[in-house]
Image: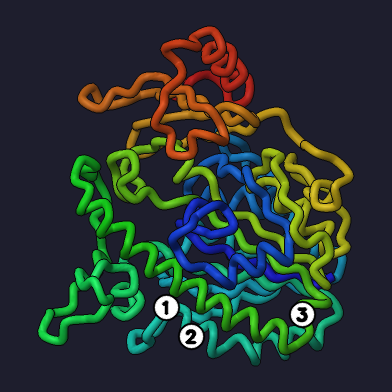
């Protein structure tokens, strides 16, 4: 079948209604989830854009250093006669490694333009013609990458104001009050989470960005439906990583702290005719699984890489594919690794600045979503056992 992938950078799963968010409006993504399959525990193995690209194309995990691997996804699709088109709907300064762009049959640039109201305007303009052209091909994979959710953000003032308290009991705006601008370009670095007003302001800004992005996706989904692609193509939405927004004292990729807001990303899959609609998959999945899954969806087999074909999970044929998932990250010589099981997450710091030293932390999952209750002081033996599993999974503790 034909397949459409939308890879939205910096998209934490916790900001989508289908993942339990109750205050941010994402009706189009929620409809996609209701018509498709929601992977509840999809974890980045290395929350870095370059690493995500390698995992997607090679089907190989990125939590430990690995030798250069072939792009099994693109090679397999080419061998099966599937046309591959990558749409760059991101700013040029957020391009990832050149190797990611090398093997596609076509790289189509729909870059944001200076006078556009939204960074996605260019791709929304180009999409009808691109889809019409693709539909003359027998089989194809369309991959759209966007940095819409990575700051600096284009935030519509009216959407942002909808997330602000206006201070009027009747809910009416006061005409002579100056508009409050959104926090559109938060600096990467430490964030004082003891300032609830600043944290709330940042989160309301991002909520406006997510809701706007959802509306833009809705326009794209309308184009898909108008061409019958809701009956003939699979749609998949995912991300390379979440974007820290002050929840644990930092904004952006400042320290490699592998909290859930960073490593849990959306994975939503809608099959043609909404087959398997409403299914939720609780199994642990990772980016390396996409290569085999997309090969299988496109009828190109599912060989290559070390990830898993997720379609048996989608169809309910199996309940799990791995016992645990690993993550690792390093930023400027600071390192951390993590292991995720169905009931626990263990964070294991490696090298750390002396003034920011972190201890090993253990959290109950999925109950402790925001990771505020460290269980390790009263579950040392369990934490040690998980750390040993982590060492086996990713090698020794990062150094």
Q: Residue furthest left?
A: 176
Q: What residue sits 61% from the left and 28% below the top?
A: 343
The residue identified by callout 3 is: 229
Q: Nearer the viewer, mark 1 or mark 3?
A: 3
The residue identified by callout 2 is: 122
Give percent across and percent down for residue 372.
Answer: 39, 31
Q: Is residue 154 visible?
A: no
The residue identified by callout 1 is: 119
Query: How many C-alpha atoms fall within 10 Å of the one at disc 2: few (<14), some, or many (≥20)?
Result: some
Q: In which quarter of the image is residue 18?
A: bottom right
Rendered-image quadrant of the C terminus = top left
Q: What residue sits 28% from the left and 76% below the top?
A: 171
Give percent across and percent down for residue 34.
Answer: 69, 64
Q: What residue sits 82% from the left and 77% below the top?
A: 231
Give percent across and percent down for residue 230.
Answer: 76, 77
Assess whether mark 3 and mark 1 are in contact (beta carbons under 8 angstroms): no
Q: Can residue 341 be seen in this view?
A: yes
Helix, strand or loop at disc 3? Answer: helix
Describe residue 67's horizontal placement relative to residue 283 as left or right. Answer: left
Helix, strand or loop at disc 1? Answer: loop
The vertical placement of 381 against 49, above or below, is above
Q: Which of 301 and 101 is in front in this view?
A: 301
């Amino acid at each position: 079948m034909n397949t459409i992938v939308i890879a939205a950078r910096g998209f934490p799963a916790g900001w989508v209604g289908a993942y339990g968010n109750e205050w941010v409006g994402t009706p189009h993504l929620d409809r996609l989830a209701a018509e498709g399959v929601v992977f509840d525990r999809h974890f980045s193995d290395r929350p870095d854009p370059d690493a995500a690209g390698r995992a997607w194309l090679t089907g190989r995990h990125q939590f430990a250093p690995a030798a250069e691997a072939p792009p099994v996804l693109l090679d397999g699709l080419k061998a099966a006669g599937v046309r591959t088109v990558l749409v760059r709907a991101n700013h040029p300064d957020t391009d990832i490694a050149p190797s990611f762009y090398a093997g596609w049959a076509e790289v189509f640039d729909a870059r944001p333009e200076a006078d556009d109201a939204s960074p996605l305007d260019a791709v929304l303009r180009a999409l009808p013609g691109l889809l019409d052209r693709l539909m003359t091909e027998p089989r194809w994979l369309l991959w759209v990458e966007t940095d819409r959710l990575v700051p600096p953000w284009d935030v519509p003032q009216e959407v942002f104001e909808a997330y602000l308290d206006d201070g009027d009991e009747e809910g009416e705006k006061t005409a002579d009050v100056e508009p409050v601008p959104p926090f559109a370009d938060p600096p990467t670095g430490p964030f004082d989470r003891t300032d609830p007003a600043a944290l709330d302001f940042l989160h309301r800004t991002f909520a406006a960005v997510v809701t706007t992005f959802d509306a833009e996706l809705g326009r794209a989904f309308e184009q898909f439906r108008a061409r019958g692609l809701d009956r003939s193509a699979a749609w998949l939405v995912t991300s390379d990583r979440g974007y820290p927004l002050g929840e644990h004292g930092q904004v952006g990729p400042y320290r490699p702290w592998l909290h859930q807001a960073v490593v849990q990303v959306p994975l939503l899959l809608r099959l043609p005719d909404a087959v398997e609609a409403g299914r939720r998959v609780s199994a642990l999945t990772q980016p390396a699984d996409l290569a085999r899954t997309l090969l299988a969806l496109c009828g190109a087999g599912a060989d290559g890489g070390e990830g898993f074909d997720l379609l048996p999970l989608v169809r309910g044929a199996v309940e799990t594919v791995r016992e645990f998932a690993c993550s690792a990250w390093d930023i400027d010589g600071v390192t951390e690794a993590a292991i995720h099981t169905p009931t626990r997450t263990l964070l294991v710091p490696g090298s750390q600045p002396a003034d920011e030293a972190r201890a090993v932390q253990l959290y109950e999952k999925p109950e402790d979503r925001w990771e505020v209750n460290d269980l390790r002081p009263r579950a040392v033996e369990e934490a040690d056992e998980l750390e040993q599993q982590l060492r086996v999974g990713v090698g020794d503790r990062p150094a």
